[in-house]
Image (tube, rainbow, N blue to C red):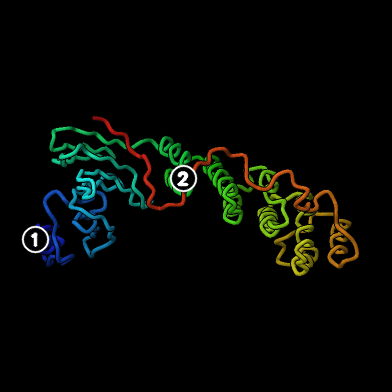
Amino acid sequence: YTIPAEGTIADSARSGQAATHLDDRGCAEGCSDVNPLTNELVVGRGDGVFFFTAEDRGLARPYKGEKWAQWLDGYVLLASLEPSLQRTGITIYDLQNKLSAFHMRLKMGEGVKSVVSVGSTAWVLSSGMQLLRLTEKKTSAKLEWLLQKNYFPIAISLASDANYDPGAIIDIYRRYGDHLCKKGDFETAMSQYLHTIGHVDTSYVIMRYLNTQRISLLTLYLEKLHELGHAVAEHTNLLLSCYTKLKDSEKLDAFINGENGGLFALTATLETAAAASTAQNGEGDYGGPAAVPSESDLSRDGGGDNDDDDDDDGDDDDALISGFDVER
């Protein structure tokens, strides 16, 4: 790449080919770097961070202040003067998860003199001749911090990208569901609990939805149990009861008659199905052991047993995670 302080950024000409025009503006010295693995160029300017391939300009990230830019094995290290504080801040940005993985500020009056990186470790020399070594934390340490702050979506993404133990990922989904239940978001919580089918005891989830206002979500869970082959007779009884409470005769009839291509295979006894059908037609009350109790019958109202919640909101894509250690 040809990157002047003033003028055009271009992909350097190859043998017998003309250089490709990429952008009309250059950048200051030290404000660009090339990813040695992908040959992607990162450029830091006063109005943002810009990424280029050999063919065209790619992503852009708004980021005010003149800055130093450096690739760091899947991350971009940015150093810039923060105008409001008049101090130089160092930020490491996680490109894949689109979040700030690390941030710190240098002493007042100090700037960045030089940056050298090898793999996921960077050495930063300040103008005050202070040498900092920034080292990426292990995945387990980053996950622990994320879970403490309830940044569950980021934790799931990080664990999945790192090919983490499937059981550990399932447990994060469970904890995320518990967190959402405590916030009263039972619908989104159910989306997380569906991932735990086959791994978490079904009663753990069902007890959180034994409320007349949540029968539709409980029905969704029970249908998924049948679809994935994890339902037993008690689940079938409860599903029939849900259809009855919802007065969903179409699904009830389809279930009993074995329609929908066997999606809801009938596993309950004929007596149970007949009792549910009778209740649907107003000729009796289905109140077997698996019947959905009324709200007054519940010992608790949703939520969960997870005590990890605090005031942090884990759904912020711009969240700052402590992904690096600093040594001076």
Circle 1: residue type: Glu
Q: Based on the displayed image, in which of its 4 quarters is residue 221 positioned?
A: bottom right
Q: Which residue is mark 2?
A: 312
247 lies above or below 198: below
Q: Residue lying furthest right in this view?
A: 283
Q: Quadrant of the C terminus?
A: top left
Taking the view exactly as shown, the residue that stands out farthest to the bottom is 250
- Visible in this render: residue 39? yes
Q: Secondary structure at mark 2?
A: loop
Residue at 13 percent of width and 38 percent of height: 127
Identify residue for label 1: 6
| Residue drawn where x is 10% and y is 63% of the image | 7
Point out the image quarter for the N terminus. bottom left
Does residue 185 appear left or right of residue 54 in this picture?
A: right
Residue 259 pos. (x, y %): 75, 67
- Where is residue 178 drawn, in percent x and y? 59, 45
Q: Amino acid at mark 2?
A: Asp
Q: Earlier in the sequence, mark 1 or mark 2?
A: 1
- Total labels drawn: 2
